């Protein structure tokens, strides 16, 4: 581990525990204690979600409330984890139950919790699809969506977010708000450094050439932008990636074949792993060194899964 992570490990966590994910030790599992959950829930009673939507500065106050409950050890750990390329991802869950009934009130608690986490590590971008700093959407058994996001019965291929927007997208937060009659649909993760053929495509003549990127109508982003797949290197000279197969618009044979072969290589790589999220938990990844996707669901006429997404940039 890097010196940054070692520094955090020397600070005893207060109000939460940390353990590596069983299938891949890069992913850190952070569990808030029942006391932390109760204290945060109580601290949030004065602020409904609507207040957070209308007053952006309150989102930082929410983040500070949670961090203060942990003696500011949570923020140190999460930021160090996200800045360490060897980890750069965590699954956050909590023990205990908020002092509220199920339904929309429970969902409000979940939104407040994810808001605290996203603003501890950075600042979410405006999500044009939903019109807020976060997006909520539901996957159903039948859907005619113009992207794979809501299509339940196919695998959503591994990708990075933010390919078609001007804002920098350093992190992606994916939270499960609810589910019913769900089997399958696990999150899929592949760290860039575990991709066996990374060097082949990073050293390819097309790796630093601009590609045109657009989005379907449901994303509410009409402009197109251009950027290469490997658009920068991190502080240690390792590549950062920005790729999704659905929204690339190749302009010639060379671009098309490069994208096709790279997509096939990523999907064929055996180093990916699956993560099943409990309701209320969230998966947060450094967007430029992790590829993420979703496995297909088993068909059920009343299948339903509601997700919340926040994606944004680091501010520290």
Image (spheres, rainbow, N blue to C red):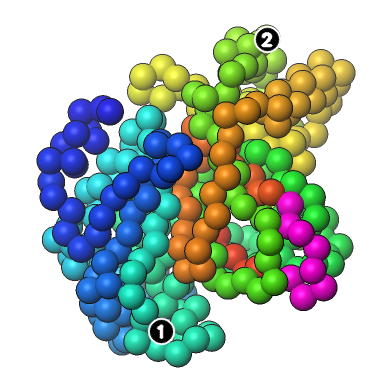
Q: Compared with residue 222, is residue 89 higher up or lower down, i.e. above or below?
A: above
In the image, 180 versus 75, the foreground residue is: 180
| Residue 157: quadrant of the picture | top right
Residue 21 image position (x, y, % from top left): 41, 44
Secondary structure category for the residue under label 1: loop
Give the residue at x 45% y 37%. 24
Residue 11 falls left or right of residue 85: left
Residue 30 image position (x, y, % from top left): 33, 54
In the image, 123 versus 283, the foreground residue is: 283
Q: Is residue 223 visible?
A: no
Q: Is residue 38 magenta?
A: no
Residue 307 image position (x, y, % from top left): 59, 65
Q: Compared with residue 215, is residue 54 higher up or lower down, i.e. above or below?
A: below
Q: CA distance from mark 2 to mark 1?
A: 51 Å
Give the residue at x 41% y 25%. 234
Residue 143 image position (x, y, % from top left): 83, 65
- Residue where numbered disc 1 is placed: 48
- Residue where numbered disc 2 is placed: 205
Quarter of the picture containing the N terminus is top left
Give the residue at x 59% y 18%. 196
Give the residue at x 31% y 87%. 46
| Residue 180: quadrant of the picture | bottom right
Secondary structure category for the residue under label 2: loop
Q: What is the magenta range?
A: 296-304
Quarter of the picture containing the C terminus is top left
Question: Mark 1 or mark 2, which is nearer the start of the sequence?
Answer: 1
Q: Compared with residue 124, is residue 2 higher up or lower down, i.e. above or below?
A: above
């Amino acid at each position: 581990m890097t010196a940054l992570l070692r520094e955090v490990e020397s600070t005893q966590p207060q109000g939460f525990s940390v353990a590596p994910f069983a299938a891949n030790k890069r992913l850190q599992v952070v569990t808030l204690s029942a006391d932390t959950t109760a204290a945060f829930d109580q601290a949030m009673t004065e602020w409904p979600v609507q207040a957070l939507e209308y007053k952006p500065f309150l989102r930082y106050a929410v983040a500070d409330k949670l961090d203060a409950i942990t003696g500011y050890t949570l923020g140190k750990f999460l930021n160090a984890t996200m800045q360490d390329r060897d980890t750069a991802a965590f699954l956050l869950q909590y023990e205990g139950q908020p002092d509220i009934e199920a339904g929309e009130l429970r969902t409000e608690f979940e939104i407040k919790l994810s808001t605290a986490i996203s603003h501890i590590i950075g600042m979410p971008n405006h999500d044009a699809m939903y019109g807020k700093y976060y997006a909520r959407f539901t996957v159903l058994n039948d859907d005619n969506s113009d992207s794979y996001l809501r299509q339940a019965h196919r695998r959503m291929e591994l990708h990075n977010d933010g390919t078609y927007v001007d804002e920098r997208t350093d992190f992606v937060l994916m939270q499960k708000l609810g589910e019913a009659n769900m089997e399958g649909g696990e999150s899929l993760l592949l760290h860039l450094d575990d991709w066996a053929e990374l060097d082949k495509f990073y050293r390819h003549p097309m790796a630093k050439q601009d590609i045109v990127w657009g989005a379907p109508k449901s994303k509410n982003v009409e402009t197109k932008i251009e950027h290469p797949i490997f658009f920068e290197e991190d502080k240690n000279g390792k590549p950062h990636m920005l790729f999704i197969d659905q929204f690339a618009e190749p302009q010639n044979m060379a671009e098309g074949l490069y994208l096709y072969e790279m997509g096939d290589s990523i999907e064929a790589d055996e180093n990916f792993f699956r993560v099943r999220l409990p309701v209320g938990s969230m998966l947060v990844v450094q967007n430029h060194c992790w590829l993420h996707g979703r496995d297909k669901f088993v068909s059920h006429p009343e299948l339903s899964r509601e997700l919340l997404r926040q994606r944004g940039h680091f501010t520290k």
